[in-house]
Image (cartoon, rainbow, N blue to C red):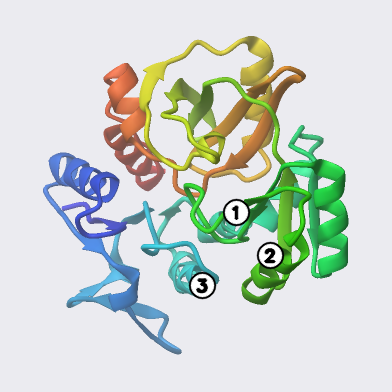
Amino acid sequence: MIKIAVVGAAGGWSSETLADAVERKTGFRLLVEMDQVRLDLPSGRAFYKGHDLSEMDAILVKKVGARYSPDLLDRLEVLRLIAEKGAPILSDPCRIMRVLDRLSCTVTLQLSGIPMPPTTITEDVDEALAAVERYGETVFKPLYSNKAKGMIMLTPAPGVREKISEYHAEHPIMYLQQKIELGNEDLGLVFLGGEYLCCYTRLKKGGPLSDLRSGGGKYELYKPTKEILDLADKAQKPFGLDFTCVDVALTPDGPVIFEVSAFGGFRGVTETTGIDAAERFVDLALSRIEQ
């Protein structure tokens, strides 16, 4: 029996869906929560509820924690050791690390010449204040977050310096972007094994951070132009992830990239195309095992 473990969150829709797909394909089901894994050194063996993860034929990473934080990097180090021992892990833990930190992801995108909203990174409150005065509406984004969690919007106004200081106390390295004018939709372009799979749009419910994927809305299938598709492909290539979603925003000046996701979701693919993205991901893992 082929044994493929899924690293994810028990009860999470995408994690459970992926574990179910593995079971349908192999007859084996193991959903691993990283906070319950024990790593044994120097043997390099990792255990989860009696299972030795180093003996798996492959491991699929869907989610390494309930919330984004630097702690996830340490969990990925555990997976990195397992990967170095021979079990193929999709996506490779080292590659996930490069997109997990918003700053690391941004630097890679910038070095690749990917258009993004005007961005400032600083540890200095006065410099952050100057950026807000320069940008106008400005979004402050934690380095580790998803779906707009922890983000705030500030504008030049009396008392803004105090608000920046409060934010800085919790986030010493401040990442801020100029809020850009968007339409009522943004795009998710999905790539599997580095190949384009599909594109969907997220129609928003509205709200001050709706353009930052704060949740809500619904998915609809979208046919991207060649310009959009080429841009998203160029954005995802440096990371080499096995499954990812590239967030593209449409602006009056053309498309820009918000982020490349470390753990792209399956729901948008399934709801808009009928494609079982989880099953496709398992097929990719099986092809790697056969190699």
In the rendered image, the vertical position of residue 197 relative to residue 156, given as above or below: above
Mark 2 near mark 1, Cβ–Cβ under 8 Å?
yes
Q: Earlier in the sequence, mark 2 or mark 3?
A: 3
In the rendered image, the vertical position of residue 182 relative to residue 10, given as above or below: above
Q: Earlier in the sequence, mark 1 or mark 3?
A: 3
Q: Position of residue 44 (x, y in %)?
A: 42, 81
Q: Dot 2 surroundings within 10 Å: few (below 14), some, or many (20 or more)?
A: some
Front residue of 181/156: it is 156
The residue that label 3 is drawn on is 77
For image coordinates 83% across by 59% down, the residue present is: 129
Q: Position of residue 283 (x, y in %)?
A: 31, 36
Q: Secondary structure at mark 3?
A: helix
Mark 2, mark 3: which one is toward the viewer? 2
The residue that label 2 is drawn on is 163
Q: Residue at the front extreme? A: 158
Mark 1 near mark 3, Cβ–Cβ under 8 Å?
no
Q: Secondary structure at mark 1?
A: strand
The residue that label 1 is drawn on is 152
Residue type pointed to by label 1: Ile
Measured in 3D between alpha carbons, the distance from the residue under mark 2 to the one under mark 3, in whole angstroms, is: 35 Å
Measured in 3D between alpha carbons, the distance from the residue under mark 1 to the one under mark 3, in whole angstroms, is: 31 Å
